[in-house]
Image: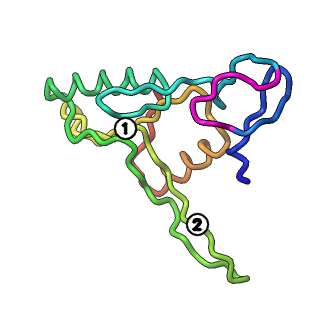
Amino acid sequence: MKNDSVIKCKHCGNVQLKQTKQKKCNACGKLLRSKYNSSKIIIDNIKFDSKREAVRYKELKILEQKGLVKDLELQKRFILQDKYQNGTGKKIRKLEYICDFYYFDVKNGKWIIEDVKGYKTEIYKLKKKLFEHQFYPLVITEI
């Protein structure tokens, strides 16, 4: 069983299987929350991880319609390190950074990488450093 297939109630500590669309704890009946307390939202048949990300998407679509930005991409992947095999023969997966939004700012003539962040994890901080070193002069703009 994977770690992400169970959920722990923050109220009573009960551990239970995560089931689709399950909203309440089996033991205490209180609401279960996502890891970062965000709610998924769907706009234009696209599922966003948070309301803030969905709002930013709507703003960028308006800017795109006005011609201020172009070539808007969502969830663009950047390879920070290719997969490889270590000295013991173990296969190591590739390391990727996936931005929320990638687009060309027409006014400034630059490519923009945006990430909507509520909480910066240690993994995110490390990937940001690796990205900005490897893809210099591009920088990640946090919204």
Q: Would you identify the image quadrant in which residue 56 lies?
A: top left
In the image, 143: left or right of 22?
left
Question: Observer-nearest residue: 74 or 113?
Answer: 74
Image location of residue 127, percent across then percent down:
56, 49
Looking at the rendered structure, the kind of residue marked 2 is: Arg
Which of the marked residues, 1 or 2, is nearer the chain's N terminus?
Answer: 2
Q: Would you identify the image quadrant in which residue 37 lies?
A: top right
Image location of residue 70, percent across then percent down:
20, 37
In the image, 137: left or right of 61?
right
At numbered mark 1, what does the secondary structure look like: helix, strand or loop? strand
In the image, 50: left or right of 43?
right
Image location of residue 71, percent across then percent down:
22, 42
Give the prevailing secondary structure in the magenta stretch. loop
* Circle nearer the viewer, 1 or 2: 2
Q: Residue at x 38, y 40 (%)?
A: 113
Task: Tell me which segment is drawn in magenta.
Answer: 18-27
Looking at the rendered structure, the kind of residue marked 1 is: Phe
At numbered mark 2, what does the secondary structure look like: helix, strand or loop? loop
Q: Residue at x 76, y 17 (%)?
A: 29
The quarter of the picture where the N terminus appears is bottom right
Question: Observer-nearest residue: 34 or 36?
Answer: 34
Q: Which mark is residue 93?
A: 2
Q: Pointer 1: residues within 10 angstroms few (<14), some, or many (20+)?
A: many
In the image, 88: left or right of 34?
right
1 to 69, vertically: above or below: below
Image location of residue 99, percent across then percent down:
44, 43
Q: CA distance from mark 1 to mark 2?
A: 24 Å
Q: Which residue is mark 1?
A: 101
Q: Pointer 2: residues within 10 angstroms few (<14), some, or many (20+)?
A: few
